[in-house]
Amino acid sequence: MKKLLMLPWRLFIFLRQSFVNIIFFFILIGIIGAFTQDDSISVPESAVLTVAPAGRLVNQETYTDPFAELMGNEAPSETLVSDLENAINAATSDDRIKGIQLYLNNFAGGSLANLHRVAVALETFKASGKPIYAFADSYSQSAYFLAASATEVHQPPMGSTLLTGFGSYNNYFAGLMDKLGVNVHVFKVGRYKSAVEPFFLTGMSDDARANATEYMGDLWGSYTASVEERRELAPGMINDMIANIGTNLQAVEGDVAKLGVDLGLVDHLSYRDQLRMKLIELVGEDEDGSYSSIGVHNYLSVEGPVSLPSNNQIAHIVASGAIMGGNQNAGTIGGLSLSKLIRQAREDENVKAIVLQVESPGGSAFASERIRRELELAQEASKPVVVSMGSVAASGGYWISATADKIWAQPETITGSIGVFGVIPTFEDTFAKVGLTTDGVGTTQLAGAMRTDRPLSNDVKDYIQGSIDTIYDQFLGLVAKGRNMTKEEVHAIAQGKVWTGKRAIDIGLVDAHGDIHDAIEDAAKLAGLSDYQVKLIEKELTPEEQFIKELRNMSVSLGFNPNQSTLSKWVTRFEAQAKPLTELDDPNHAYVRCFDCEVDGL
């Protein structure tokens, strides 16, 4: 018996010792690396900049628990858009960088807005007269969008380039809920607020279908026009290629690699060693018998000129992810944590203006209003607030933006979706199927009214719907105030309808088209600044978290980014679809969230 009771304690000791040993092992690696590596990273006198984005292209890296990573939990593979932009822009005027190798095998995609930012930097680099060589075993639509800026597009003789168009597909749970006996109570305002449709329909409504067709048509039109222009293809060529895919494949006897060359999407069918020789010819051979190169992370780490702190600063704050209550880590917007960052900027006397970079489909209405109010306080303190919308700033993402002094968006930004919904499932019929019942007493008819094992009373339903209606009216009011419109004018373009940035500027939801750099320049003008510094305000990492981040960056530089298996990609996709359901934490069960803002094919 004594031995049996000691087993849990021995297991605990073993796990604790193992954990300490793992930490010590990584620290030892870091110490050894610090003593064995060169004192500083230098850029070769003649080199290729290797741009090899890994994972998704993002505006803010998702926080991961460093200790969970040490114990083997994988962190999401992500690449910052700003890192690629900064490296490519710096390399454009760097005489040591003779060209770019754009390696896209580990690239998992990104929003069209973010892809455009990188493409603009690549086009500027190419315009300087330096070549760009793109390579991938097979090009996804996102990867090919970047490759279209290359001087030469290469792929192996057994590679492929598949362009399919964009889609928006959801799973619908009404039939499943019926079988399980789950009663889903839906409350919403907005004809086009389709986020809750999967809970009570078996397919897309006509309104949702029309709205999705419109905004995805805009995005696909932007994609094809950009690729066709940069590749010097005839307008409409990509749609024609897809429409005649069967005939085109028959003409090349099913050789998809040859088809890419024949259609002008690919320049050369090359093995990696053949491309390597071309790069050696460009920059010369290094001591390892390959071409001289430097990666993005190492290139950015090269120490530049020291700039003294300025008394005139523009605060740059990133709001990325779903909006939830409380304190949240990077990759999710917390009503409390983001408000703290905005307050920090407001209370900093050196900060003269704030630029909020929004990348969010929304979430909690309560948390959204908390953030918007903090921005309003900054404006009352005579600090202009400018919003820069990324790939998506819809629902709650638009709520926190609505009363800014200026709103910038990109033509491919998904925005609007001004509507409110609530959803509460109850399981009384589910429990009844297995013989479980609920009974008891309360001091009023509302006592226990929100229990999920009891039906919702009509009084509770009226209460929740009234709250949803009130919050929608408040949403209309703050948009009307911020955009100098009437509530009636806002309602006409609201009702949950999704707009692209291309259309949003015509209906008054945004002021101008441009990216984060344009927004920062505009904020400086509003603050009357001609000489200023940009100060990124974000939650600081602990030394342990920073250590893990450096290890991760090191692994990226060394190429440890294996492609996901088909099964792994499917599981990741399923998790992404289910995740929004875990982020519904509003105290009033009222949400300004766009579930339809994710576009398949990017």
Image (cartoon, rainbow, N blue to C red):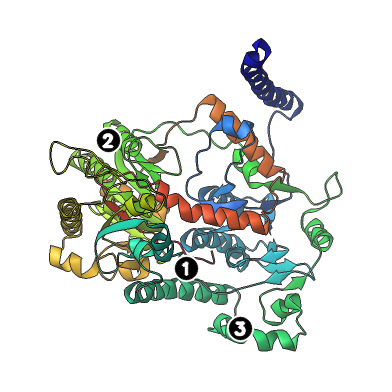
Residue 548, numbered label: none
Is residue 171 among what the camera can see? yes
Q: Are marks 3 and 1 in contact (CB under 8 Å)?
A: no
**Circle nearer the viewer, 3 or 2:** 3
Q: Which tag, 1 or 2, sits closer to the chain's start?
A: 1
The local crowd at label 1, few if under 14, some if 14 to 19, many if 20 or more residues have their Cα within 10 Å, is few
Query: Is residue 187 left or right of 297 when viewed as pictured?
Result: left
Q: Which of 66 and 132 is in front in this view?
A: 66
Residue 241, numbered label: 3
Q: Which amino acid does label 1 sit on?
A: Tyr
**Circle nearer the viewer, 1 or 2:** 1
**Circle nearer the viewer, 3 or 1:** 1
Q: Which amino acid does label 2 sit on?
A: Arg
Is residue 486 among what the camera can see? no
Q: Residue at x 55, y 82 (%)?
A: 239
Circle 1 residue: 169
Q: Is mark 3 on a helix, strand or loop?
A: helix
Circle 2 residue: 346
